[in-house]
Amino acid sequence: MMKLKILFFGITTDLVGVSNLDLVLPDASTVLDFKSLLKKKYPQLENLDSYAIAVNESYATGDLILNEKDTVAVIPPVSGG
């Protein structure tokens, strides 16, 4: 098992009720595994059309394998005006 620091931004902070938390995932979990776990733990995130995941300050694809002590950011869709 590995422990990750999760950061929430914008509306995702409102939906989950915190701006950051620590989450434990199985070793060799991917970003897709993380998103699946996140939706189970916080079903209110389903209300978002989409959100991006950044790992250690870089946008991540679903097949990226997460590592112990990674910082994962959940970034909501951004609309321009």
Image (tube, rainbow, N blue to C red):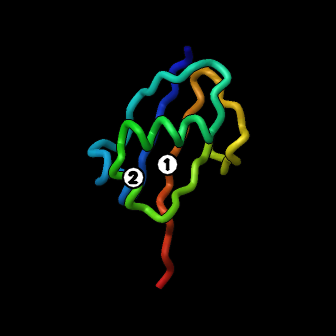
Which residue occupies 30% across, 42% down?
Answer: 18
Residue 27 in the image: state x and y as whole percent: 63, 18
Name above or below for residue 63 compared with residue 44: above
Q: Are marks 2 and 1 in contact (CB under 8 Å)?
A: yes
Amino acid type shown at disc 1: Val
Percent across and percent down for residue 15 are 31, 52
Mark 1 is surrounded, within 10 Å at the Cα level, by few (under 14), some (14 to 19) or many (20 or more) other residues, namely: many
Q: Residue furthest top?
A: 1
* Dot 2 alpha-carbon crowd within 10 angstroms: few under 14, some 14 to 19, many 20 or more: some
Task: Tell me the quarter of the picture where residue 29 sits.
Answer: top right
Q: How far across and down, in percent of the image, does residue 68 sit? A: 60, 21
Q: Is residue 25 left or right of residue 62?
A: left
Return the mark for residue 74.
Answer: 1
28 left or right, relative to 48: right
Q: Residue 45: which numbered mark, if any?
A: 2
Q: Position of residue 69 (x, y in %)?
A: 57, 23
Which residue is rendered at x = 50% and y = 65% of the image? 77
Q: Amino acid at mark 2?
A: Leu
Quadrant of the drawing holding the N terminus: top right
Which element type, helix, strand or loop, lies under badge 2? helix
Measured in 3D between alpha carbons, the distance from the residue under mark 2 to the one under mark 1, in whole angstroms, is 10 Å
Mark with earlier residue (2, 1):
2
Please say if 71 is above or below 43.
above
Decide if residue 13 is on the left or right side of residue 76.
left
Closest to the camera, between mark 2 and mark 1, is 2
